[in-house]
Amino acid sequence: MPNLKEIKRRIQSVKNTQQITKAMKLVAASKLRKAQLAILEARPYAIKMMDVLNHLAARCNSDLHPLLDEREGNRHLFLLITSDKGLCGGFNGSLIRKMAKHLKDNAQNENSLIVAGKKGNDIFRNRPVTITEEIIGWTKDFDYLKAQSIGENLTTLFSEKKVDKVFMVYNEFKSVMQQEVVVEQLLPVVPENLAHKDDTFAVDYIYEPDEESILDELLKRYMTVEVYRAFLESSASEHGARMTAMDSASRNAGEMIEGLTLTYNKARQAYITKELIEIVNGAEALKG
């Protein structure tokens, strides 16, 4: 027969856990609102930036800037954006599986990683891949200046021909319930071919001071904006995943409490019935 004290202790333990998960859900919901607002504000700017870059780069010679240089080398650098903390469902697991599969499928390349987030670093530092840089604690105070620093670092590595291609691997925020893992080529910049579908492509422009200077400034801003957007997408995705996971955990805890309470009541009723039977049997024995 179950021990009543043990069941009662388990019920209290699950209740304490439920209080924690509910609190974490509220915190994640609060952070999600801010992160969602930030990414919704950043997306239109990033889209327009890419639109302008497409128009300019499509008219310019790719030799004008090193970031447009398509090379045949196999030195690939990946910026992997994970979280610093867990308890966010499949947020990190889906990223790590995608990254591991990509590395396995492209094992013939000379792959290296820049890992943002403690969770990704904990996994890949024990695997046969070179980690060139670790960005730990980015979720606390990431801002545009840090994105600019990362963008400049990636630009320098590519311009100095230390790597031939640069990719970003991150979770794109779709909704609170849905995040999509994206593997995006960042460098070299491959402008979309607009000549066959954009009526404005035929329009000629006057550049001041010149095409090369404008392209250089635009590409620098593009790098910062794309890195910044990817981190914002990842931040919103993390909070959405954590909020969903904690909501699910709270509901599961509630179901466990109901089940344990039912077990406790049944066990208590059995004890009372047993005691009543013993009392009745004792009374009958005295009469005899």
Image: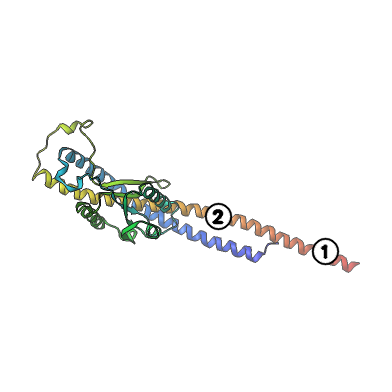
Decide if residue 37 is in sight here: no
For the N terminus, the quadrant is bottom right
Seen as rendered, the residue at the extreme bottom is 286
> In the rendered image, which quarter is residue 112 located in?
bottom left
Q: In the depicted view, which residue is nearer to us: 266 or 71? A: 71
- 54 horizontally vs 272: left or right: left
Pointer 2 local density, CA inside 10 Å: few below 14, some 14–19, many at least 20 = some
Q: Which residue is mark 2?
A: 254
At label 2, which amino acid type do we have?
A: Gly
Q: Amino acid at mark 1?
A: Val
> Label 2, label 1: how many angstroms apart (C-alpha)?
39 Å
Residue at the image position 48 percent from the left and 61 percent from the top: 20
Residue underneath mark 1: 280
Quarter of the picture holding the C terminus: bottom right
- SS of the residue under disc 1: helix
Disc 2 or 1, which lies upstream in sequence? 2
Where is residue 176 drawn, in percent x and y? Answer: 41, 48
Q: Is residue 216 left or right of residue 234?
A: left
The secondary element bearing badge 2 is classed as helix
How many numbered circles are shown? 2
Residue 151 versus residue 31: which sits nearer the camera?
A: 151
As rendered, which of 281 and 142 lies closer to the eye? 142
Q: Tell me where residue 105 appears, x and y as whole percent.
A: 38, 46
The answer to whether marks 2 and 1 mark residues whose Cβ atoms lie closer than 8 Å is no
Q: Which residue is at the front of the view, 39 or 221?
A: 221
